[in-house]
Amino acid sequence: MLENLVDFGLVYIPPSVKDQFFPTRLATTLTSDASALRSITAGFESALSTGSGTAGFIIIETNYHSPLQIAVLALFTKLTTRYPNMVTGRVTRESVYRAVSSGISSDQIITYLSTHAHPELLKASAAKGGGPVLPPTVVDQIRLWQIENERMKTTYGFLFKDFESTDEYKKLLKYADEIGVLTWASKTEEKFFVSKVEQLKDYMKSLKAK
């Protein structure tokens, strides 16, 4: 019974002294005469009436914090700080590279940022007659970082050139293609590039032995 009264907020049990308990303010108010209840109600109504013209001081915050939104931001930003109601991060060259390599395009990043922009950004966009939500320099930079990443791709391998004959070039080229190691080839210059060389070396030896 005592535990139920504690749950209802009618009884207080000190953590250090378990064999003692005290009635709470709520319990004494409920068990007192009706005039005490009326005084509490009157005081609350008075606070409502007098507080309408004064400056507010209470902040009410929702307990809804979406881990999904934070996870999406982490895909293309470098998160630096996480607060209970806010995260901060930076869109960097490395973070955009990481997103692009995962299959996320610059247009998708820009669309997401525009869709989930702060109300102040949306308000500024509306004031300009429905212009772009994000600053043009930010949009251009994100797109440039994607192009930068796609401009050049390095591949480790071996270049074959200076063949003894065109026939030797064609045979080796065909064999490299068949075993799946051919990366690049130039028929006019009779050159080709492969990712692995071991099997080609053995094949070259067999050609020369004939």
Image: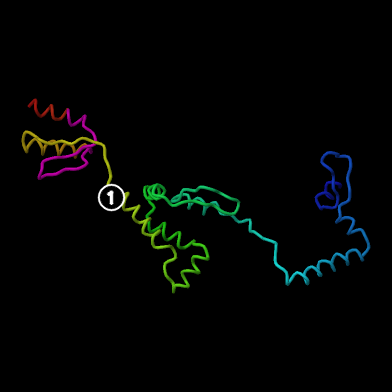
Q: Position of residue 200 (x, y in %)?
A: 18, 31
**Left or right of 169, for residue 12:** right
Q: Residue at x 49, y 65 (%)?
A: 121
Q: Is residue 161 magenta?
A: no
Residue furthest to the bottom in view is 129
The residue range painted magenta reads 180-201
- In this view, the residue farthest toward the right is 33
Q: Amino acid at mark 1?
A: Arg
Find out whether residue 192 is within the magenta segment.
yes
Q: How is the image coloured?
A: rainbow
Q: Is residue 105 above or below residue 185?
A: below
Task: Residue at 88% x, 40% y: name it.
Answer: 19
In this rendering, the count of numbered labels is 1
Q: Quadrant of residue 128?
A: bottom left
Q: Residue at (5%, 36%) from the top-left corner? A: 165
Point 81% across, 70% down: residue: 46
Is 149 placed above or below 133 here?
A: above
Q: Position of residue 187 (x, y in %)?
A: 11, 44
Residue identifier under label 1: 151
Q: Nearer the viewer, residue 146 or 140?
A: 140
User: Which of 14/194 is in front?
Assistant: 14
Coordinates of residue 181 in the picture (x, y in percent): 22, 37
